[in-house]
Image: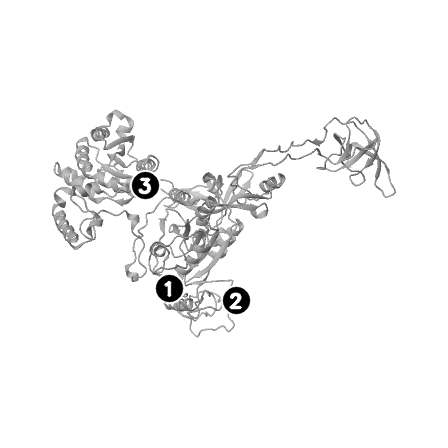
Amino acid sequence: MTYRVSVITVSDTAAADASKDLSGPAIKSILLESAQNGKFALESSKIVPDDEKFIRNTVKSIAENEKPDLLITTGGTGFGVRDRTPEAITPLIDRPAPGIVHLMMADSLKHTRFASLSRPVAGVIAGTSTFVVTLPGSPKAVKENMTSLLEVIDHALDLLRGDKGETVHKQLGVMDRQSLGTTSDVGQAKEHSVTHQQQQHQHHHHHHHHPVGHVIPTPRTAQPLSHDPSQPVSNRNRVSPWPLITFEKAVSLVLQHCKPLETITHPVDSKLSGHVTAEDVYAPHNVPNTKTSNVDGYALPSTFRPGVYDVVTPETHSIHQRLPIDTIMRINTGAPLPYGTDAVIMVEDTKLVQTDEDGEEDEVEMLAAVDPGENVRQPGSDVMKGEKVMDVGEIIGSNGGEIGTLVFVGRKEIKVHRKPVVAILSTGNELLDITSDPPPHPTTPSAPASPLHLSRQVSQVASRRSSANPSRRPSFNPLTGVASTHPQRPSPLAAITTDDPPSEKWTGVWDTNRPSLKAALEGLGYEVIDLGIVPDTVEAHLRALREGLDKADVILTTGGSSMGSTDLLKPIIERHLGGTIHFGRVAIKPGKPTTFATIPHPQTEPVDSPQATSDPNSVDLTPSEPTITSGITGQNPRKRVIFALPGNPASALVMFWQFVVPALRRMGGWPKERCKLPRVKVQINEDVWLDPRPEFHRVVVRWTSSGLAAFSTGGQRSSRVASLAGANGFLALPAKVEGGKSKLEKGSLVEAVIVGELQV
């Protein structure tokens, strides 16, 4: 196997004069020797100055665009004033490799104690499979480090490619994982483990930790990263195990895993808007199919000269018969010409001479002559028979043009990609549904329950109610601490007096996300299934998600995707539904905990399965491989898509536009290049401060005399949904970098994502 390598020399001197670069050629020479054995291939080499930002951007660009297996830098790892290579690269690494650093340092220290003044870093660059390692700028030190590195790095690169590393393990005498099933095998494995531990620091430097002996490493995606919700809260992750990936990488993953849905035959009506054609459309006949008038006027032979003529109409004379002598026919725009005529004179070029007793035109004077074919649409002049009028993959817009074209050529139905059905739900014991009615006999508690008491009690009560009757989804009253199937509308401000202790004043919050998302989705023309508010229990989550998987193509959840003790979505997706989480954190503001996953569609009522239960009200909590069944309309089995959006309202809506809308478009058959929302350059009317993360700042974009301008909607806190009221765009603000600008000044041109109609 050949590994692709890129080399970067970091040096102000070499950047000014490439002939002064000595360490870069030393690395190339060593790689060339390995290349003769087919092991390494040099992809590219660059020289950059000792500028931290420039180094970081160069490394990031090479990793994301050239995608080398190994990226080696040389120079800038000491304590000189301009030595900033470790500081430039460390933020890019999401999986450090301290063992590699220790190995290189240990071997270098055998030659000189000054090696202790080097500050190397190594690891995998976030969002890529590129392994980066920083070497000193001395050619001698480079050779020492490369000798150590090349002894072990190929095994790491194999694992990053998704291989299992059998070659190295066979060289070490390690048994295959599947052979460890018998007692004697386990004993041999333990014996190997002891031997391996004794030899580790002599020659191997291969520090995996395996559950039984030394077995083949498992790729990190093979095991759930999420915490086990059945364990005590104290066992949950304290640091998110999900890599923090870039926004661009996240969007790329969404479009990669969201595939166009099957095609359907749809009638040509207003509901066709937003669909994408799945066939080329050809005109079945000429349009128009006969000669028709372009204007309101009088049809006549072009041989007629100016003068007075009798007038008939289609009601008084058949268009299939020749007109009487010295007679013209009154005609409207679009009407067919009567037999024997070849021109139309506009009504403006005539004069009324006489009417009959009913006031109808009897005689009209022609004031001008007309040429043959004047004001006449010839057959096929708009569309010829067999002409293609729409291409496959064309988006049918809401402005009416595409639907009008289909009707124009006589199409009553057309094959299109099915638009995804979307299920929405909100999670959280604290949420209230504003659409619920008050109970028949409301109860006002003498002392409102505390938030801590309520959060503990609701899971038990909601679970009992749901088990008793799963068709009645419980609502939760935070005033009484009771879950009930009676619809309720307790106000978050009700039953509170100024004398209440501060700890007793919490009464819940209105669920903003479901109504907001439903309005946005239906405004875009998508069918929405409302799964309601889901309490913070595994049972309730599973019941709602399985209903969504059965009824919808996409599930949108809000809340429950972060690091809280009741944030259950990630573990339920992984451990109970057999799903794959493609990303769980994004380096963006707002919306960092946004999660994207795909889930196989499970059979909701297993037959002849050992996990099937005779109790229709119970929920199977056993993690298992789901049974794949056909989809919503009988299509081939396919994975469902789930977006776990943040619970904060502004975050949820911003992430909806940035991730969900492109996904829905792609699933509906939109071309990839048109799935993302449009961006334009706008001028900001005030200073805008930058954040360490790229940020989407909510704005109103208006057309002004100087062009497009953006006006901030005010405070941008992720919980402040009012920041989206009236917003029709998001400023795509870059991340603040060390040593760079802390703000964009008034008048600057900034890219804005457009989500609504531009204002004037």
How many angstroms separate mark 1 from mark 3 (CA)? 44 Å
Q: Nearer the viewer, residue 545 or 760?
A: 545
**Are discs 1 and 3 less than 8 Å apart at CB?**
no
| As drawn, 717 above or below 508 | above
Mark 1 is surrounded, within 10 Å at the Cα level, by few (under 14), some (14 to 19) or many (20 or more) other residues, namely some
Q: Nearer the viewer, residue 313 or 609?
A: 609
Question: Which residue reaches farthest top?
Answer: 19
Q: Position of residue 71 (x, y in %)?
A: 27, 36
How many angstroms separate mark 2 from mark 3 (CA)? 51 Å
Quadrant in the picture for the N terminus:
top left
Q: Which residue is mark 3?
A: 128
Quadrant in the picture for the C terminus:
top right
> SS of the residue at dot 1?
loop
Residue 482 found in image quarter: bottom left
Can residue 652 be seen by looking at this rendering?
yes
Mark 2: which amino acid?
Asp
Can residue 584 be seen by looking at this rendering?
no
Mark nearer the viewer, 1 or 2: 1
| As drawn, 204 above or below 528 | above
> SS of the residue at dot 3?
loop
> Could you tell which of marks 2 and 3 lies nearer the N-terminus?
3
Q: Which residue is mark 1?
A: 613
**Are discs 2 and 3 less than 8 Å apart at CB?**
no
Q: Position of residue 395 (x, y in %)?
A: 53, 41
Mark nearer the viewer, 1 or 3: 1
**Are discs 1 and 2 less than 8 Å apart at CB?**
no
Mark 3: which amino acid?
Thr
| As drawn, 607 above or below 729 | below
> Could you tell which of marks 1 and 3 lies nearer the N-terminus?
3
Q: Position of residue 541 (x, y in %)?
A: 40, 60
Q: Nearer the viewer, residue 227 or 756?
A: 227
Q: Which residue is mark 2?
A: 437
